[in-house]
Every structure is written in structure tokens, then in C-alpha cells.
Image (cartoon, rainbow, N blue to C red):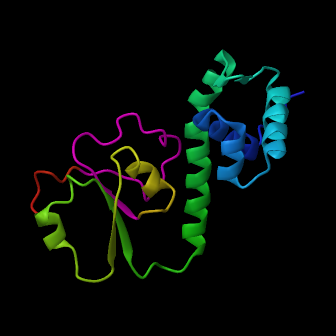
Amino acid sequence: MLCAMDPHLLRTYVTVARLASFSAAARELGYTQSAVSQHIAALEQDLGAPLLGRRPVLPTPAGERLLEHAAPLLLRLDAARADVIRMAAAPPSGVTLATTPTALGPRVLAALPVSGVSVRVLGRDEIPAAVATGHADLGLVDGPAAPSDPLQLPDVAPLTSHAVAEEPL
């Protein structure tokens, strides 16, 4: 019998693996340590494989394989949620621009309108996810932008790229 993988359990697993601690994951997620342990046990039972060694808390080979799939899956779920919320929401009164520190130069700042634009400075790898999940409306990066973008599945209309480095603002 094939069970559907619960995204809450998957998010708990990713957090435990990232922090290498059940108690730290519980604090970050707002769960009890017992609930985190139950999430991991349920996911391991569903998949039929141990995902974490307990002392120290490290992913097993099966756990490493799951981590390779987990980040794009969770990002896709967050992007789908944000996309539906955006469709149902009233039109935004402003625009949020996510950018790297080096992409945000004096020419870009001068080209922005005085009001209606808020700027979030993020790491280069964080910008595509910020745009996809609705935390930013636009993204501006320097250099190659997300060559291994995990959001390649369906064509998400608000997520496009355009090279502007050589174009005047």
C-alpha cells in the first residue's frame, strides 16, 4: 500500500537534519520534542527505512537521498500556496524587490520610484525562492541566475527571467 508523504512530517525531518537536533528542531518548529520524534518515526515507518542516526543525529544514506528531494518538494508546495494566495488577494499596493547587495547599485536605486517599492537584500540563492513563494514580487541578482532552479515543473507566470545587465535602466 502506497501512503502519501505528509509535508508536515517532511518539513520536520528537514529541520531535524539541518539542525542535527530533535530539541532544536522542536524549538524552531514550535512543537514538543516528543511530537518531533513521533513525526520522524511516522515518516520512517511510511518509507520503510531509518532516516536519521540518533547519536549523533545524522542522516542515514536513505535520509540523505530524501534530503535531495525534500528541498525542491517543500519549495514547490510553498510556491503553489503563495501562487494561489496571490490569485485570490487584492492587487498589491506596492512591490517588493529582492536583490543581492552587489546588484543593488546606485543606478538601480536611482531608477526606483520614491514610494511603492520596498527592497529586501538577500543572498543570491535565496532570491528565486523568495519570488516563487511570494515573499518578493521581483528578484534582481548579479551573475548567472539559478542555473539549477528547482521550480522548473509547471510554467509559473510570475516567475520569469530577463537579462538586464547590459540594458539601460
x, y percent for residue 160: 36, 52
Q: Nearer the viewer, residue 40 or 22?
A: 22
x, y percent for residue 14: 64, 37
Q: Is residue 22 left or right of residue 157?
A: right
Q: Quadrant of residue 70?
A: top right
Total number of numbered labels? 0
Q: Residue at x 38, y 51 (%)?
A: 127
Q: Residue at x 18, y 54 (%)?
A: 164
Q: Nearer the viewer, residue 122 or 164?
A: 122
Q: Quadrant of the C terminus?
A: bottom left
Which secondary structure type mostly characterizes the magenta part of the structure? loop
Q: Is residue 72 left or right of residue 106?
A: right
Q: Quadrant of residue 144?
A: top left
Q: Is residue 122 left or right of residue 111?
A: right
Q: Quadrant of the N terminus?
A: top right
x, y percent for residue 90: 53, 80
Q: Residue at x 84, y 43 (%)?
A: 34
Residue 69: in magenta span: no
x, y percent for residue 52: 71, 25
Q: Which residues are magenta?
A: 137-162
- Camera sees residue 130: yes
Above or below — where is 50 with respect to 157?
above
Above or below — where is 92 with respect to 161?
below
